[in-house]
Image: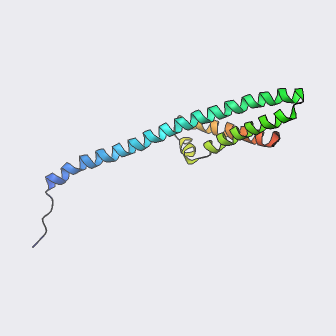
Amino acid sequence: MPKPTASPARTRRRWPRITAWTVGGILLVLIVGGVVFAFQARSVWSDLTAAKSDLSSVLKDVKKGDTARVDATAQHAHEKAAHANDTVGNPLWTVASVIPFAGPNVDAVRRATQATYDLVDGALPRA
């Protein structure tokens, strides 16, 4: 005896539900990715601002001749720049850098952060 199959009307009613769940799932992934990206962008901003402040302090400490403080401040600036560089190097930032309209700005932040890290890594002494 042949197996009963679903009626065409019943099959047609499933597709809107499947489509809605698929679209909803994609939207959820995009929203979560956007929130994670926003938190990471804030973290990068905070790290680079702290590194900038440290670099200003290093210059003042060098003028004063306070080598211990120069070493400690330089190490802190290096840690902040390294953390920011690690953050912008993750796959989420790579994907975000190719998004139309926003991508060039994200890519500019990535490049500036990488340049800052290279500068701090090569120019400042490490303890």
Q: Relative to residue 56, is residue 48 drawn left or right?
A: left
Residue sitting at the far left: 1
Can you say which quadrant of the picture contains the C terminus? top right
Q: Position of residue 105 (x, y in %)?
A: 59, 34
Residue at the (73%, 37%) spot, across then down = 76
- Residue 6 occupies which quadrant of the picture? bottom left
| Res 30 visible | yes
Total numbered labels placed on residues in the image: 0
Residue 94 position in % (x across, y down): 57, 45
* Residue at the bottom extreme, as displayed: 1
Q: Is residue 57 above or below residue 103?
A: above
Query: Which residue appears at 14% of the width and 52% of the height?
Result: 9
Q: How is the image coloured?
A: rainbow
Location of residue 37 in the rendering, given as x and y in whole percent from the top left corner:
53, 38
Say left or right for 26 vs 51. left
Residue 105 seen: no
Where residue 98 appears, as percent x and y from the top left, is 55, 42
Q: Residue at x 12, y 71 (%)?
A: 2
* Residue drawn at 9 percent across, 73 percent down: 1
Relative to 99, is 80 on the left or the right? right
The front one of 83 and 96 is 83
Q: Nearer the viewer, residue 52 or 1?
A: 52
- Residue 43 to residue 60: above or below: below
Image quarter of residue 49: top right
Q: Nearer the viewer, residue 33 or 22?
A: 33
